[in-house]
Amino acid sequence: MKPSMSAKLENLARRVDELDAILSSESATRDMESYRRLTREHAEITPVVELFRRWRARGDDLAAAQEMLGDADSKAFAEEEIGQARNDLEGLEKDLERALLPRDPNDERNLFLEIRAGTGGDESALFAADLFRMYTRYAERNRWQVELVSESASDLGGYKEVIVRLVGSGAYSRLKFESGGHRVQRVPETEAQGRIHTSACTVAVMPEADAIADVHIRPEDIRVDVFRASGAGGQHVNKTESAVRITHLPTGIVAECQDGRSQHQNKDRAMAVLAARIKDRETRDAQAKEAATRKNLIGSGDRSERIRTYNFPQGRVTDHRINLTLYKIAAIMDGDLDDLVGALVAEHQAEQLAAMAEA
């Protein structure tokens, strides 16, 4: 293990001991805000320290086994223990490297998921509805809450655009690599001659912004328009101007919501989407600068990039960034995204480890 890595882990181990003492003291809960902050810190670094302690214990086991090599009666056992301990140490060191990777401060946040139909007309809108179902099914598998923010339906039952808020622990960390162009190849239901068509949708995944801490939106920088909502919703939608559109004048970013039951609710939701979009633009600008200095396949933030193809005739899904092809399209479209998500997370960690090695 590198000396710098060992020193960092030793510091974390000492910090856990300090936190244990602080949190167990009688005065710990006098300041609840401080208590919550220290509890979060303790929960975050304790798993890393536990890994480090296991690594250190296996190192002690290795040293003890090496001392036993001089004893003829124990030599065979010692050699076996040495081999196992070395394998364990190698695996634990890799786990520690991953555990010490820089954390994305947005990983534990909720997210806004936007799906927009692209090239392909009605078929693209139908594919947008399929993607919407795929992600909501994945959310259900993870017991996340799904809140519809806005939708613009197409004539054939698809979506020109749909926005949802996904609420759940680690939601953004799991879906943050889904942003980009998604292409579908299949025979549309409206195709009489059985020809395969290609169409596309754009997916954007944005962490929910803290409007106070992350994005400062001045009242004079926004324009709020109210209008009568369209689409499903019954008489209430048709008779009241409850839909809200908010424009951020400095950037031209627009957010609107019409699915809430009141103008106030729609304005709150639209403001949340607006803040997320502003923060997202800032993040993508920063990622673009980083990508200009070194190759960064996964987190490039480029929405125009085609990241994945769903080929229905061949039953395959291919993620072009990591050259991964899975022949389980039915399961994936039903929300079984773990293989895709896991591979993307692993590739991103590999990129981070390579960058650390170069530094």
Image (tube, rainbow, N blue to C red):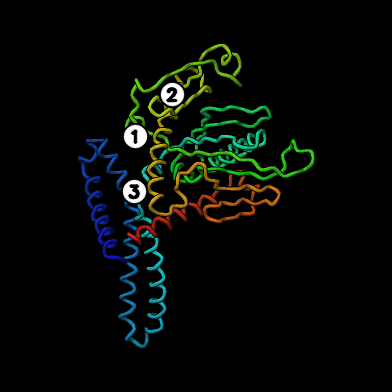
Amino acid type of the residue that numbered disc 2 sits on in the rendered structure? Thr
Q: Viewed as shown, does residue 267 lie left or right of 161?
A: left
Packing grade of label 1 (10 A; few <14, some 14-19, many >=20) is few
218 lies above or below 325: above
Q: Secondary structure at mark 3?
A: helix
Question: Residue shown at 66%/47% (left/top)?
Answer: 330
Q: Position of residue 62 (x, y in %)?
A: 34, 74
Q: Secondary structure at mark 1?
A: loop
Q: Position of residue 22 (x, y in %)?
A: 22, 46
Q: From the image, tell me which residue sits under label 3.
A: 44
Amino acid type of the residue that numbered disc 1 sits on in the rendered structure? Asp
Q: Viewed as shown, does residue 228 lie left or right of 189?
A: left
Question: Residue shown at 55%/31% (left/top)?
Answer: 162
- Looking at the rendered image, the disc whose residue lies closer to the viewer, 3 or 1, is 1
Question: Residue shown at 23%/35% (left/top)?
Answer: 31
Between 61 and 225, the residue placed more toward the observer is 225
62 lies above or below 298: below
Residue 247: give its label: 2
Q: From the image, tell me which residue sits under label 1.
A: 214
Residue placed farthest to the front in the image?
292
Amino acid type of the residue that numbered disc 3 sits on in the rendered structure? Glu
Quote the CA–CA distance across marks 2 and 1. 18 Å
